[in-house]
Image (tube, helix red, strand yellow):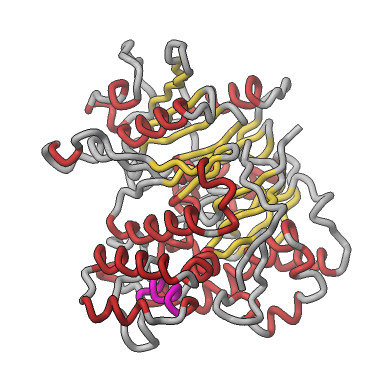
Amino acid sequence: MTLNDKDFRIDVTSEIGSLRAVLIHSPDSGLGKVVPSKAQDWLFEDIVHLDTLRKKEYDYYIKLLLYFLDPDKIKGKLDEVDTDRSFFKPDNKDFHSSTKVLELQVLLSDILQETDIRKKLVASVCAIEGCSYRMQLRLIDTDAVQLAKIFISGALNDDEMIFAPIPNLIFSRDIGIAINNYVLLNKPAKKARFRETLLMRYIFFNHPLFAKFRDNILEIPETVHHFLRPGEDNEQKTTLEGGDVMMVSPDHLVIGCSERTSTSGADEAIKLLFEHNVVKKVTVVKIPNKRDYMHIDTVFTQVRRDMWVILHSLAIAEKPEKEAGPAAWFADKKSKEKTEIVQFRQGKKPKTFDNIEELLTDISHKDLGYEGEVKFIYSGNNTFPFDAREQWTDSCNLLAVKEGVVLGYDRNDKTVEAFVAQGFNIIPVAELLQKFENNELNPKTLTDTLVLIPSAELSRARGGFHCMSMPLWREKIG
């Protein structure tokens, strides 16, 4: 069934405005085929148990999103959908088909209905995956719904795989980011994610849901003459992933330089955004190039206009004045293990910040107009070793479904204590869903709440709910 919604829009001006539309991808069969010897190549820390991950963890996430974004799809059906999982399966006739909680696999199925697009995408996928010509012809003749499953899971059927899976597709934020009414399509650092990027390009440029925004889709180019540059230095590659991009106010974007996003990628993004007048300033936060951190949203995310959850700031050295541009500013190889923060503004000199808290305080005050004390909730309640342990299991990687209501993992006990100390209500997701169903609580009136979702399997994939969401539309915050 083709998704089309005349009222749909792309409009994201903050990290905390009430979520109205989000792009996700539910765990597919490819996750259940990751083997230990390939787990790290496919960017997982461990193999996962697929049924547990789906039924006891991720399904809660989908139900909760629907109660907040599209309650008509779920209200009054809670017991029913728990009994029959066809509600969660994108290739099933009983799938929820929400135009607010958008499933990437459904959008892919839609565009594959068009013969010309199907032929082009099959040829492109087969080229990067090294398929035979006969397999290419076979895929062209495959039903669109089944073909979408094949492209994502890598499985031709239950017994035969023809590509590697792309298990990281559940982290939908990394392959694109909405910035005001633009979409920035990203460039992943790892080969394991190349097919994801290709599928996302085809979806955004060809699906009718995005037709009126087509001129606002931006693609990051490679650095000029990149193919002539020697070596494999990540600083020279043009890479950028959505976990390193935060839309903190209508005029201000934050980009992280990390294990996955290079200074060249930040450079190219800034050029594009300034050229199209998408934002007025971009702050680049360079964090240590370590697996511990991966993206800036593993280090901090926003809870309210006056509150952030964060891993305690890393040490910073004094920085000499350098010419404008991230690639030049961060060129000193000695700074690889430091956190550095510099803000680029059109027509003005760059501005630096001493630490992440200083930057986030500046955002709360100057960008969001908050006049009081800015509060920080620290990972692990800022107590060693719990700060590092819980940051590893995504204590800082929270998704705000509205200002002050955030989703996180149930395993980060000390971080939960820090939320309680700040006056937050803590509620397990199953209890909250039942209260929504029984009209004891209302998503529209819920405030200052941390919702805890089971995470024994999800946390093995090294990403939280901020990673597992690509917001396309948020209400503006007052």
Q: Position of residue 128 (x, y in %)?
A: 25, 63
Q: Is residue 122 above or below residue 202?
A: below
Task: Say which residue appears at 32% left-offset and 82% top-offset.
Answer: 138
Q: Write down the region rendered in magenta.
A: 146-154
Q: Position of residue 235 (x, y in %)?
A: 25, 35
Q: Position of residue 413 (x, y in %)?
A: 59, 54
Q: Is residue 47 left or right of residue 136?
A: right
Task: Say which residue appears at 65% left-offset and 58% top-offset.
Answer: 452
Q: In the image shown, does 320 or 422 lie closer to the viewer? A: 320
Q: Is residue 292 visible?
A: yes
Quadrant of the drawing holding the N terminus: bottom right
Q: Residue furthest bottom?
A: 159
Question: Is most of the magenta stretch helix, strand or loop?
Answer: helix
Task: Please tell me in which quadrant of the rendered image residue 373 appears.
Answer: top right
Q: Position of residue 334 (x, y in %)?
A: 23, 26
Task: Say which residue appears at 42% left-offset and 44% top-offset.
Answer: 295
